[in-house]
C-alpha cells in the first residue's frame, strides 16, 4: 500500500475528518485563493471542479499547526526534538525502478497554463504562480540533494521565472552560468508533510541532504525514481514533476506578487526555467499553497528549533513560539524557568540573536501560555515595567523582505522581559486559582447547551 506523498495524506485527512471538499466550480483566478484565504489556510480543501480544467486542486494542506503535527507523526512537546533528531541523523533514501509518477510522460508541446489550473492570487500579481512547487537540485560538488520551495511565475508555454532568495542556490547557478551551463532542476507537486518539512531545513546552516532528512523524519526511506531528461531523482508517489533547466544568461522580469506579510514585493529580473518534460500520475491533483500563509508555519517550526537551541545555552527554556502574527519570522515569544535575576534579559539577548529576522521577543515565566496572545498581554500588563524591562537595539541586521525600514535590511529590535522578579516579591505574582476549576464539566450544569 502506498504510504508516501499527497494521496496518502489525503486519505489520512479524510480519516481524521479534516478534509473539506468543494464541489462547486471555482475560478483559479482569484476565487480559489479567496476560498483558501477565508480559512486562513488552516483547512485542507480539495477542489473537485476548477474552471477550464479537468484536474482537481488541493490547498490549505499544511498551515494548521496541530494538524501538521499529526501528519508529521509528532506532538507539540516533541516537535523540536523530532526535527533536531532528523537533522543530526539523516537516513538513506531508496531508489526504485518506477512509480505512479511515471504513469504519464510528456516531452513535446509543453504548455503549462493549458496543462494545469495554476492560480492567480492577487489583483496586481503579474501572472499566475506555482507557489507550492518544491525545487529539487543536486549540489554540483557534494551531489547532496537540495530541496526548497521557490515561487514560479508562469511566463507562458514551458517557461517559468524563479525567485531564489538563497545565497547557496544562487551561487551554484552563477558558477554554472559562468561556464554557460544550465542548472538542472525538477519541480515537485503533490507531496506530504515530511517532504515539505525537510525542504524547509536550511542546507546552508546544516549542510544536509534533504532527501536523507526526509527519510529520517518519516522513519522509512523516501522512495525515488530517476527523471527522464535530467540527472535527478524525484519522489515515486508525487503527483506532478516538471523537469527542466535554469537557463544561463537569461533574465526576465518577475513580479509584482502579493507575498510576505501581504505586501507586493519588488519587481526585478530573475532567472527562468525551461521545462523539457512533465511527468504526472493519472488524474493528478494540483497542489496549491496560498502565498505566504501555510508555508510560513513550516519555516516557523525550523526557526523554533534555532530559537530553542540558542536560548538554552543561556537560560532554562520551557517553550518557544515564532508567531503567526509576525509572519512566522519576525516575532517570538518564549517561556523560561527563571533562576537568576538576569535570566529575562539574557533570554532577550539570545532570542534576538537566534535569527536576524526576529524583530521583537517577549520573555515570560513558565505559567504563561505562549500560544495565547491574551496570556502574553496579561504577562506584559502585570509583570513588566517599561523603564526596567524593555530593551531596544537600534539598527541591527534585519530582514530585507520587511518594509518598515524601507527594505534596507537594517532593523531595530525590541525585547520585553515580562517575567516576575525572584525572591520574596515573587509571592505577589502568584496566580489566583479556583480549586477544581480544570475538572468542571460545564455540560453537567447546562445539559442543553450547544
Ligand atoms: C509554500 C512555500 C513557499 C516559499 N516560497 C519561497 C520563494 O518564493 N522564494 C524563496 O526564496 N523561498 C521561498 N520559501 C522558503 C524556502 O523554501 C525555504 O526558506 C528554504 O527551503 C530553506 O532552505 P535554504 O535555507 O536551504 O534555502 C517558501 C517556503 C514555502 C513553504
Image (cartoon, rainbow, N blue to C red):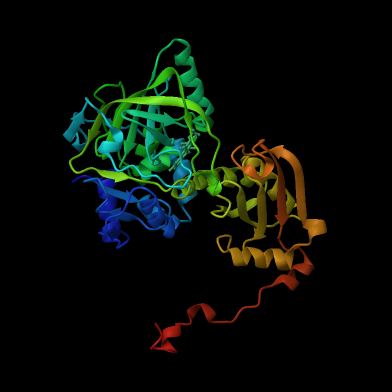
Q: Position of residue 422 (x, y in %)?
A: 75, 62
Residue 106 versus residue 302 in the image, above or below: above
Could you tell me how many numbered marks the image carries?
0
Q: Farthest residue toward the right?
A: 387
Specify whether residue 299 is in view: yes
Specify whether residue 74 is in view: no
Residue 57 versus residue 356 in the image, above or below: below
Q: Farthest residue toward the top?
A: 179
Q: Position of residue 166 (x, y in %)?
A: 51, 30
Quadrant hosting residue 136: top left
Residue nearest the viewer, comparing 174 with 115? 115
Residue nearest the viewer, comparing 1 with 387? 387
Q: Position of residue 101 (x, y in %)?
A: 22, 35
Left or right, residue 364 beside residue 263:
right
Residue drawn at (61%, 47%), measured in percent from left and top? Answer: 330
Residue drawn at (63%, 46%), measured in percent from left and top? Answer: 311
Quadrant hosting residue 141: top left
Residue nearest the viewer, comparing 183 with 415? 183
Residue drawn at (53%, 34%), measured in percent from left and top? Answer: 267
Left or right, residue 309 beside residue 187:
right
Quadrant that contains the C terminus: bottom left
Q: Position of residue 123 (x, y in %)?
A: 46, 47
Quadrant hosting residue 277: top left
Residue nearest the viewer, comparing 386 with 84? 386
Left or right, residue 416 beside residue 436:
right
Amino acid at each position: 500500500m502506498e504510504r508516501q506523498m499527497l494521496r496518502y495524506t489525503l486519505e489520512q485527512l479524510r480519516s481524521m475528518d479534516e478534509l473539506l471538499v468543494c464541489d462547486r466550480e471555482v475560478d483559479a483566478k482569484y476565487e480559489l485563493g479567496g476560498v483558501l484565504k477565508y480559512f486562513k489556510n488552516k483547512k485542507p480543501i480539495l477542489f473537485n471542479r476548477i474552471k477550464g480544467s479537468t484536474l482537481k486542486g488541493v490547498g490549505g494542506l499544511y498551515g494548521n499547526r496541530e494538524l501538521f503535527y499529526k501528519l508529521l507523526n509528532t506532538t507539540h512537546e516533541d516537535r523540536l526534538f523530532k526535527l533536531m533528531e532528523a537533522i543530526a541523523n539523516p537516513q538513506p533514501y531508496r531508489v526504485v525502478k518506477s512509480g505512479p509518477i511515471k504513469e504519464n510522460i510528456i516531452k513535446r508541446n509543453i504548455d503549462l497554463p493549458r496543462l494545469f489550473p495554476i492560480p492567480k492570487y492577487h489583483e496586481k500579481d503579474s501572472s499566475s504562480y506555482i507557489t507550492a512547487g518544491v525545487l529539487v537540485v543536486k549540489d554540483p560538488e557534494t551531489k547532496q540533494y537540495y530541496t526548497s520551495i521557490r515561487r514560479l511565475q508562469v511566463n507562458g508555454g514551458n517557461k517559468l521565472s524563479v525567485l531564489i532568495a538563497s545565497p547557496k542556490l544562487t551561487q551554484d547557478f552563477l558558477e554554472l552560468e559562468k561556464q554557460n551551463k544550465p542548472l538542472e532542476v525538477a519541480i515537485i507537486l503533490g507531496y506530504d508533510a515530511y517532504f515539505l518539512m525537510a525542504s524547509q531545513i536550511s542546507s546552508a546552516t546544516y549542510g544536509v541532504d534533504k532527501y536523507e532528512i526526509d527519510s529520517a523524519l518519516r522513519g522509512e526511506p523516501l522512495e525515488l525514481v530517476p527523471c527522464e531528461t535530467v540527472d535527478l531523482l524525484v519522489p515515486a508517489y508525487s503527483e506532478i514533476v516538471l523537469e527542466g533547466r535554469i537557463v544561463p544568461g537569461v533574465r526576465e522580469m518577475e513580479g509584482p506578487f502579493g507575498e510576505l506579510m501581504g505586501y507586493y514585493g519588488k519587481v526585478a529580473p530573475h532567472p527562468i526555467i525551461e521545462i523539457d518534460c512533465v511527468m504526472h500520475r493519472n488524474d493528478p491533483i494540483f497542489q496549491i499553497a496560498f502565498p505566504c500563509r501555510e508555508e510560513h508555519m513550516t519555516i516557523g517550526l525550523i526557526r523554533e528549533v534555532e530559537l530553542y537551541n540558542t536560548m538554552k545555552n543561556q537560560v532554562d527554556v520551557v517553550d518557544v513560539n515564532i508567531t503567526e502574527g509576525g509572519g512566522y519570522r519576525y516575532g517570538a515569544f518564549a517561556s523560561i524557568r527563571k533562576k537568576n535575576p538576569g535570566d529575562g534579559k539574557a533570554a532577550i539577548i539570545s532570542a534576538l540573536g537566534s535569527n536576524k529576522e526576529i524583530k521583537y521577543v517577549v520573555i515570560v515565566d513558565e505559567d504563561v501560555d505562549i500560544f495565547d496572545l491574551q496570556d502574553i498581554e496579561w504577562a506584559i500588563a502585570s509583570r513588566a515595567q517599561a523603564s526596567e524591562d524593555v530593551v531596544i537595539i537600534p539598527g541591527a541586521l534585519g530582514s530585507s523582505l520587511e518594509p518598515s525600514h524601507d527594505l534596507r535590511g537594517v532593523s531595530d529590535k525590541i525585547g520585553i522581559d515580562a517575567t516576575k522578579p525572584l525572591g520574596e516579591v515573587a509571592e505577589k505574582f502568584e496566580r489566583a486559582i479556583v480549586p477544581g476549576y480544570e475538572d468542571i464539566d460545564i455540560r453537567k450544569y447546562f445539559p442543553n447547551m450547544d
